Amino acid sequence: MKIAVCIKRVPDSEARIKVGADGKSIDESGVKFVLNPYDEYAVEEALRLKEAAGAGDVVVVCVGPEAAQETIRTALAMGADTGVLLRANAVGLDPLPVAQALAAELKDGGYDLVLCGKMAIDDSSHSVGPMVAELLGLPCVSAATHLEIADGAGKAEREVEGGVEVVEFALPAVITADKGLNEPRYPALRGIMMAKKKPLETKDAALEAGDIEVVNLTPPAERKAGRIVGEGPDAVPALVEALRNEAKVL
Amino acid sequence: MAGVIAVLEQRDGVLKRVSHEALTAARSLADALGGEAHALIMGPAGMDAGEVGTYGAEKAFVTADDALTLYQADHYAHIAAGRVQAGDYAAVIVPATALGKDLAPRIAAKLACPLASDVTSVTHDGAIVVTRPVYAGKANYTLKITAQPCVISLRPNAVMPAEAKRDAALEQVPAAGGDKAATARTLAVKQPERAAQDVAEASVVVAGGRGLKDAESFKLIEDLAEAVGGAVGASRAVVDAGWRSHAEQVGQTGKVVSPNLYFAIGISGAIQHLAGIRTAKTIVAINKDPDAPIFKVADYGIVGDLFAIVPRLTEEINRAKEG
Ligand SMILES: Cc1cc2nc3c(=O)[nH]c(=O)nc-3n(C[C@H](O)[C@H](O)[C@H](O)COP(=O)(O)OP(=O)(O)OC[C@H]3O[C@@H](n4cnc5c(N)ncnc54)[C@H](O)[C@@H]3O)c2cc1C
Ligand SMILES: Nc1ncnc2c1ncn2[C@@H]1O[C@H](COP(=O)(O)O)[C@@H](O)[C@H]1O
């Protein structure tokens, strides 16, 4: 099985996000960057499929700045075989150019499966996986929480409002990973050492500009300070009163 | 003038509330553009599309076929992209639900056009301008979309459905159209044992955290949810502990919710949890620790033991409903 995993370098979920001097992007100073958490599920699933098949090749592909080599090394340390960095200093807010760059890279790779995260936790776009699938003309199941692959076909489950969709598809296919798909492994020391010697190819991404311009990036509106209605069960009537007559939500 | 088309979502042949929201957003954007608002509805044979005119659509394209009862991604995307190409549209608006988040990028890729996901507002200022929360709600982008058509997915509960009566002309469109064999097929939607409202769509959410101590105590949360007609939500701590299903998890790696009323009960208010509730309109916190971070974002708080407070609250609300 030849499996590609698309991975993105993103600010850590705990990172404090400050707007940069340009008012249009984040101030990256002091921000720790990590492998997108949903992509960890994707890498893990690829490794499990390879292990189950007893053979295979897991290639991680990333569109990002030079520093994303470190992100790729994280995936290699988990156990991926090779990495490709499609270098782009700025990745815009329109997901199409990124999907196009990835699709162009994957097109003639002979992959049986392409795995992505369900979303990148920075732009939270939830788009690149299904877009890549469309561009490659492949079936796609997004936000999968369960995946079975056998004999050139697969079955996946995805959570939808009020239920779980069961989808059947033929390979090759694109699957995007949701939490619940698996429990990603931590890179072991041996993996980290081995990752340093694994092949990592870097080339420039031919990234289109896209058709979405940033007007500004702003901190979210501060929630106005609320109030403690009281202590213990005796405060309940005052709360109900406030919800009914002040907030008018009951 | 170019118009706007809303791609609507139904369940069992009935339009969902998110569809009314998408229609409302389409109507107001169409007004700004000086064009018409249209709707596309895909679903089972015999479904009722009558209400689209209520929310301002001048025209609705209805593809009613039992092959489309469940969401069939390839077929839906094929029909939707074809419909957009057949008309003159500046924008396609899709609810950002599980279905819409999957469908929107497929339409955008087919049309090779820009996509703005999970937006909380859509306006027009020389170009279409949207806002979208990013970095798990820690910042908001204001974005200008510089090409037409474009695809926009709209976060549930971000726009209040507003009635704007039109005599919507319904045009039935056969599902055939293109002979592309579906490469992925949705076989079924498994329903949970207890049909519950979805946290992401509910207008009231009652969420519980580790303060509940065990899975059984969630009965307190369920009772309150029933009293207020809301959905049950959960923190990641209790989902990881196996007390509740991941479908109920609110936060960065769960669902982002924008209800009118959110109860955080026995939830500390970790940054990843807060990421999911930033656009909730009113937040109520019940926690025994007066310094819990949840109180910094709550509109109303009660400090104390949830095991004493929550039953009393349920009782009080039930009584208020009767009186
Ligand atoms: C990458 C990443 C993603 C994450 N994503 C999410 C996410 O999507 N959603 C999420 O929720 N978390 C997420 N987390 C986890 C998050 O950091 C917290 O660990 C989690 O939210 C804590 O859940 P909790 O508030 O239920 O538990 P705790 O933090 O343990 O809080 C329990 C609270 O209950 C109160 N309490 C205890 N007993 C009582 C009582 N008798 N009466 C009243 N109050 C009581 C305590 O004072 C305390 O404030 C994520 C973490 C990471 C690293
Ligand atoms: N720059 C990128 N490089 C590689 N993969 C990406 C990139 N951006 C997004 N992806 C993939 O697409 C998924 C969804 O991202 P998004 O659509 O941006 O939310 C991610 O989890 C990755 O798997």
Image: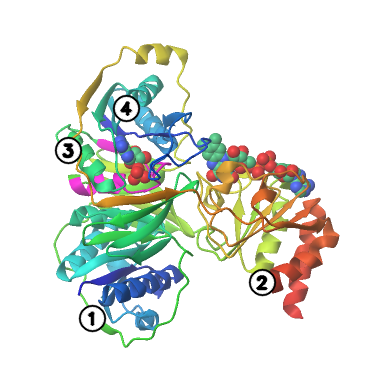
Give the label on residue B181, or none.
none
Query: What is the C-alpha distance between the residues marked 1 and 3?
Result: 39 Å
Image spot of residue A93 (x, y percent)? 32, 47
- In this rendering, is residue B89 above or below A59? below
Q: Is label 1 or label 2 in front?
A: 2
Query: What is the C-alpha distance between the residues marked 3 and 2?
Result: 53 Å
User: Which residue is disc 2 drawn over?
Assistant: A250
Give the residue drawn at x 61%, y 65%.
Answer: B230
- In this rendering, is residue B254 above or below A54? below
Examine the structure image and report whether residue A100 is included in the region drawn in magenta. no
Q: Is mark 3 on a helix, strand or loop?
A: helix
Please rate how many residues cluster around mark 1, counting C-alpha atoms within 10 Å: few if below 14, some from 14 to 19, many from 20: few
Mark 3 and 2 residues: CB-CB less than 8 Å, in contact? Answer: no
Quick one: B257 or B133, which is closer to the camera?
A: B133
Residue A148 visible somewhere in the drawing = no
Image spot of residue A88 (x, y percent)? 25, 33
- In this rendering, is residue B66 above or below B97? below
Identify residue type, mark 3: Ala
Image spot of residue B240 (x, y percent)? 59, 40
Mark 1 and 2 residues: CB-CB less than 8 Å, in contact? Answer: no
User: Which residue is disc 3 drawn over?
Assistant: A104
Quick one: A247 or B157, which is closer to the camera?
A: A247
Give the residue drawn at x 45%, y 78%.
Answer: B162
Quadrant of the image for the C terminus of chain B? bottom right
Question: Numbered disc 4: what chain?
Answer: A
